[in-house]
Amino acid sequence: MRAAVFEGPEKLVLHNVPDPECGSSDIIVKVADCGICGSDLHSYLEGAFVAPGQIMGHEFSGTVIARGANVQDIAIGDRVTAVPLSVCGRCPRCLEGSTHLCETGLAASIAYGLPGAFAEFVRVPNAVRGGNVHVIPASVDDAAAALVEPLAVALHAAKSAAPLPTDTCVVIGLGSIGVNTVQMLKAMGAGRIIGIDVSAARLNLAREFGADITINGRDEDPLAAVTRITGEGAYGVGARADIVIEASGSAALLSQAISMTRTAGKLRIAALYEGEPAIPANQIVQKEMSVSGTFAYKGEFAEVLQLLDSGRITAAPAITHTFPLEQIEQAFRTQLDKDISIKVQVKP
Ligand SMILES: [Zn+2]
Ligand SMILES: [Zn+2]
């Protein structure tokens, strides 16, 4: 089969590689669409999360073309998307249901150790319908289904913030995770949503997805703008947003996010940072803020498909570009250009 192989920083090369073999508990999926993730960009530029020889691509949809003898309730011809994370099922985190925090399993996952979906076919190991494999409803097309993985990240972040109809929520960084978090907060009934980014295209989509106010960080300092909108925080320090979701990955904006959050407010961190950012830790103490990270998803795939099927959320507006596998380098370059792209997908 044809596959895009990571050979080193900024080097993705199309190769003919052997087709994946279907083990007794596996399925083989003919890939329809596969999105480029923010983490893929770090890998592409710096080799951050993958070694040379890796086939990347973990946000995919496609059709089942083979299934092992032990696989139940998944038929050849089913349209599916799959959770790429492999988990052990036995560690304390797995046993309490937080499989995304598995203490051992993440070493060999699809696109991380195991071959990913920037290829004609991908093998999904230990396929369990409703577990790691989800059959796509007829109302959800292949491109939308390949967006389920990042939508699950966004839903996980929004659920962790648990917005109320009276809450003012700030989302910082409106890439695919941030902008989709805006539509999840909206679907969950958040009171008022403020979106912050420096890209006009992303700010426009945030408004389409339900942001009441958008701030372009190139025009106005984000903390000053949120202070203007929500009022000054206690003792004249910072602002008074009820919920802040940091999805930009900028250390400076993480500091601002802490200052934006009101006394006893909630900060949720959905981005990763280069190095170890210095933060105004005393504010966290004095405000008794709740701060927590939000990583990947646990069980949100099914919920996302339900939300897409019911029309409560949409996928298409966030997919700005689609390239054939042959143009994968161009696809990555387009995803790197924040001014024009939100989600770029590759169609093998
Ligand atoms: Zn992803
Ligand atoms: Zn585990």
Image (cartoon, rainbow, N blue to C red):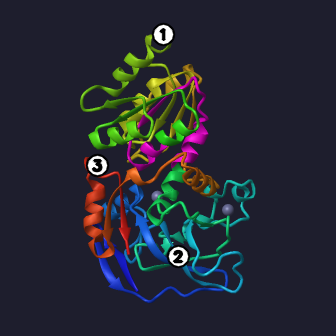
- Name the residue nearer the viewer: 166 or 112: 166
Callout 1 amino acid = Tyr
Residue at the front extreme of this rendering: 139
Q: Residues within 10 Å of mark 3 (few under 14, many from 20)?
A: some
The quadrant of the picture occupied by the C terminus is bottom left
> What residue is at 73 percent from the left and 56 percent from the top?
92
Q: Which residue is mark 1?
A: 235
> What residue is at 52 percent from the left and 36 percent from the top?
186
> What residue is at 40 percent from the left and 71 percent from the top?
51
On screen, 112 above or below 69?
above
Q: Is residue 177 magenta?
A: yes
On screen, 16 above or below 215?
below
| The residue stretch that appears in magenta | 154-181
Residue 282 left/right relative to 15: right
Q: Which residue is mark 2?
A: 63
- Write down the quadrant of residue 128 in the picture: bottom right
Residue at the top extreme of this rendering: 235
Dot in front, 1 or 3: 3
